[in-house]
Amino acid sequence: MNRYRKKYWKAKVNSVVRLFPSSFENVKILDLGCGGGVYSLTTASKGATDITVVDKEGFYVKAARLNLKMGQNVNASGIRGDCMCLPFKEETFDFIICVNVIERVSRGERLLQEASRTLKRGGLLVVTARNATSLNNLKPIRYMRLYSPKLFIRKLMRHGFSVQKHSGAYFIPYIRIANTFTSKPRLSQVIRSFFRKINESLEARGDRSPINKYGWEHAYLCRRQLADVRHNKPKKGSQEISFFS
């Protein structure tokens, strides 16, 4: 993994941020499992000033807040806590980011339930999940839960989300393939170059169907429906959040 971590992470970040709206002015944002705040920084660069970061590790909360302050002069709120038991009222946020989280938690359904509860009706969620049908995951990963796009989209729908866009990253494990030919350096170099070009072409179209189904990591842009899933009727006074159009 370490041999191609940098290229993978760059591709993954691109697959997520391509789903973001063009502006975040006057948008209340929650970053679940914030890490160092990479995605919060992107929203701040697009006008966000009301950002809350949450992570189970206090170090990451401090790092994200520091990065936002130094990088975009944004004073973010920070909470060290459990993403599956959030200390926020219902319909608090306009936009929720949840990257690198659901595949690592024991109760993915509970995480989506909390995201739905704290997101305003008509608000957006960007969530990522590892793809069970990717070539990269032919060898099982014991400590991660993998989801096929079809299964994950059904999960999202059960919690009141409709998928607006769907993006994939890292379609071909080209470095891993090339490394199987280490005894033949020239052949390894040719194979790596050939598959890298194909992979880069796929990543450039990674938000288009059906290409988006086959990436290693998937990002989903979801809108919380106005209708109450349990009763199939809109909440009184609910309106779409227009800036996401």
Image (spheres, rainbow, N blue to C red):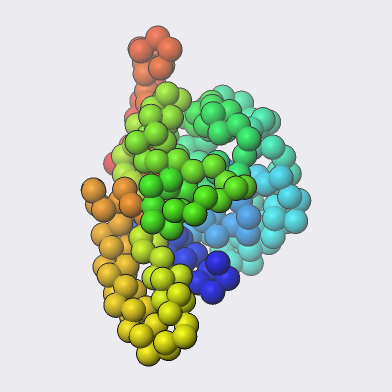
**Image position of 191 (left or right of 129):** left
**Image position of 88 (left or right of 233):** right
Residue 105 in the image: state x and y as whole percent. 62, 39
Q: Is residue 73 above or below residue 211?
A: below
In which quadrant of the rendered image does the C terminus lie?
top left
From this viewpoint, which residue is outermost toward the front? 183
Q: Residue at x 56, y 33 (%)?
A: 108
In which quadrant of the rendered image does the N terminus lie?
bottom right
Residue 26 in the image: state x and y as whole percent. 47, 44
From this viewpoint, which residue is outermost toward the left? 209
Residue 25 in the image: state x and y as whole percent. 44, 49
Q: Quadrant of residue 88?
A: top right
Q: Residue at x 58, y 67 (%)?
A: 71
- The number of numbered discs placed on residues in the rendered structure image is 0
Depth check, front residue: 106 or 175: 175
Q: Is residue 196 above or below residue 122?
A: below
Q: Residue at x 40, y 9 (%)?
A: 231
Depth check, front residue: 224 or 142: 142
- Can residue 23 be seen in this snapshot? no
- Can residue 186 be seen in this snapshot? yes
Residue 54 in the image: state x and y as whole percent. 65, 45
From this viewpoint, which residue is outermost toward the top? 231
From this viewpoint, which residue is outermost toward the bottom? 186
Q: Residue at x 45, y 70 (%)?
A: 176
Q: Is residue 154 above or below residue 65?
A: above
